[in-house]
Image (cartoon, rainbow, N blue to C red):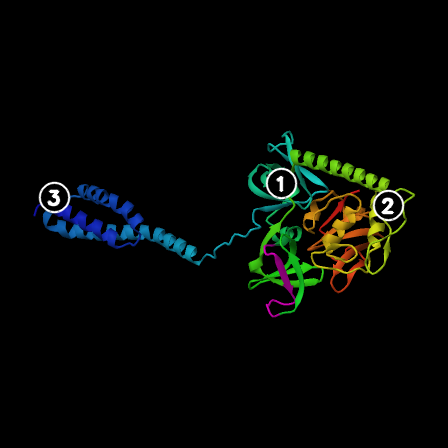
Amino acid sequence: MNRNSIRKVTTCCLTAAVVLANSSMVTHAAVSAGAGDLITSAQEETQVPENQETKQESSSTAGITDIFADSLAPRQEAIDTSIQNVQNETPVVKTEYDDIAIAQVDNYVNVRSAASEDGEVLGKLYNNSACTVLGTEGDWYKIHSGNVEGYIKAEFLVLGDAELAKSVGHRVADVTTETLNVRSDSSTEAELLGQVPQGEELSVVEEKDGWVKVAIEEGDGWVSSDFVDCSTHYVVAESKEEEEARLKKEEEERKAAEAAAARKAAQQSSGSSSSSSNGGGGRSYAPPSGGNGQAVANYACQFVGNPYVYGGTSLTNGADCSGFVMSVYAAFGVSLPHSSSALRGVGYGVSTDAMQPGDIICYSGHVAIYIGNNTIVHASTAATGIKYTSPANYKTILAVRRIF
């Protein structure tokens, strides 16, 4: 065997030894690709007698292999550590609140077309309203809320605060069956607490094991999750166009209601009978008089003591909560829906600290008429009938709507 053949065999063995000495295939490929060249260069620069060449090359091979093994050890250790860290790392679970930001401002903050105060105003995000953060640009967030997408300065938003989001969000259950039975406990054998018609939207108190606890006039009760759709509602941004349309609609409804009330009052001439009999056990009731909220409240109070009837609309023989409100306002020429949830959208909204007699007070699955002095009149339950309740916020008020 000549010198060249010995050199080639030795080089091949060394390369194989380097490959076998390590476990990372990516690292091995890079290292073994250059090992042969380095060894060949070292051998060509060293001249030794032929009878010592095999021993010398064997010794050199062992030495260089040790060098490469030593140099690879830190790399392999780092790789092993990284793998171990990945395996031991606790997975980060993303929640539904991570991208939700809540406005924390005195009244509202403008949503702009660009991340600059010079950007066009596209809409408004009111205090405690929510948006989804899509990204950041400097100290601005790009957000989406309702039908508005634009930019808000980050200082006006609180991002990823689950507790804040839960506190301003409203968990609701939409009734999907014709008549929903609400029970005192999470069992079909439990006592029937009340009933709610299809299309109503109830506030969710708790959810567990296929049952949902909801708030109704009779109290908090349980319904099967098979008959409701649950979701979280937030107040969202209002675009410029939506704000203009809302204000126009509210003004038109206010004028229409005032005109209807005026026509109704004109029909009740001063020469007409001051009272009329409308059934209800021989009781007499004064006809509606006037065209304002106080007149509505006065008229509604006459029916206290009359019965509650699920689905009913008779002020004398029985009405449910929305049927009562609907029928009272019908006497003033105002047409309203027979649904407590739908009544949240009639007329125009006012704050709870600005309530006036005649205002419609909306609760979870219930509705009433405000009569002043922190008191409401309403068709409460089958057990109590139409009655007064004070304070008006005996339950959480979801909306206050004004017709007159």
> Which residue bears the numbered disc 1?
154
For the magenta stretch, what is the residue range?
175-189
Mark 1 → mark 2, Cα distance in angstroms: 53 Å
C-alpha distance separating marks 1 and 3? 73 Å
* Amino acid type for the residue under numbered disc 1: Ala
In front: label 1 or label 2: 2
Q: Which structural element holds mark 3?
A: helix
> Badge 3: how crowded within 10 Å, few (<14), some, or many (20+)?
few
Q: Give the label, 2 or 3, closer to the camera.
A: 2
**Residue 338: percent from the left, percent from the top?**
70, 50
Query: Is residue 50 placed above or below 384 in the rendered structure?
Result: above
Q: How far apart are marks 2 and 3 (CA)?
A: 121 Å
At a point 65% along the width and 66% down the height, the residue shown is: 192
**Residue situated in front as seen by the camera: 35 or 262:** 262
Marker disc for residue 196: none
* Residue appearing at x 60%, y 70% in the figure: 189
Regarding residue 367, the answer to whether it shows in the image is no
Under mark 3, the amino acid is Asn
Q: Which residue is drawn at 62% across and 38% down?
A: 152
The numbered dot on residue 4 is: 3
Front one among 65 and 242 = 242
